[in-house]
Image: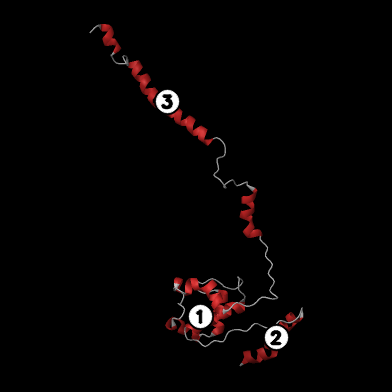
Amino acid sequence: MSDAQSEEHGAFIKTPGQLITVVVLAFVVPIFIIVLLSGYVGIGTKTGAGTDPRDPQLIEARVAPVAKLEIKNLANKVAASGETVYKAQCAGCHAVGAAGAPKIGDAVAWAPRIKTGFEALWQSSLKGKGAMGAQAGGDYDDQEIGNAVVYLANAAGAKFAELKPAPKAEGGAQADAAKADMQANAPSPAKANVDAKK
């Protein structure tokens, strides 16, 4: 073999300076490429479909639950039955006993609750008790919630009667009648003082 042929097939790096240059380039070039690629990927706002926070339709969808106004006509409303309210609002917990709720039909679990009376059970359901949130102010009025209480308690052996809707008076007369009922049932100040002294 001639010297010319051995030089063709010899090592590319022949001096220590060339070795240092190759090692430095082996580190610098990949880092430079990575920096360029990350800069390219980071340019501009990249959003997926339906995720642009400035999209008017998405803004409306986010605001809708807060800004929604719903007017219900309660004049001709037919009260839901206790069973209907139970299935819609109470069965999630009372059907399986979730979060310590007494199961429907479980006479042993319901017995101490039934002993407290309907009014106590009704107020507990309206105001909330334990893990059960307040049921008042939702889709059902207080009378419908009361009928659900009657349905649940009666399934466990109680003998509560369903609540009947109050008769509707015309116009402002309804408010006047309710006020008169409250005044008639309220104790007089003189009677309250006599009761307090006893």
Q: Which residue is mark 3?
A: 29
- At mark 2, the secondary structure is helix
Q: Residue at x 51, y 80 (%)?
A: 152
Type of the residue with mark 2: Asp
- The residues bearing labels 2 and 3 have C-alpha atoms spaced at a distance of 89 Å
Query: Which of the two residues, 77 or 145, is positioned nearer the viewer here?
Result: 77
Q: Of the residues tagged 3 and 1, which is closer to the observer?
A: 1
- At mark 1, the secondary structure is helix
Report x, y in % for residue 151: 53, 81
Query: Which of the two residues, 150 or 181, is positioned nearer the viewer here?
Result: 150
Q: Is residue 160 above or below residue 24?
A: below
Q: Seen in the image, is 125 located left or right of residue 63?
A: left
- Numbered tag placed on residue 152 in the rendering: 1
Question: Earlier along the polypeptide chain: callout 2 or callout 1?
Answer: 1
Report x, y in % for residue 86: 53, 75
Q: Is residue 113 above or below residue 65?
A: below
Q: Which residue is mark 2?
A: 181
- At mark 3, the secondary structure is helix
Q: Seen in the image, is 141 located left or right of residue 107?
A: right
Q: Of the residues tagged 2 and 1, which is closer to the observer?
A: 1
Query: Which of the two residues, 85 or 107, is positioned nearer the viewer here?
Result: 85
- The residues bearing labels 3 and 1 have C-alpha atoms spaced at a distance of 75 Å
Question: Earlier along the polypeptide chain: callout 3 or callout 1?
Answer: 3
Quadrant housing residue 189: bottom right
Type of the residue with mark 1: Leu
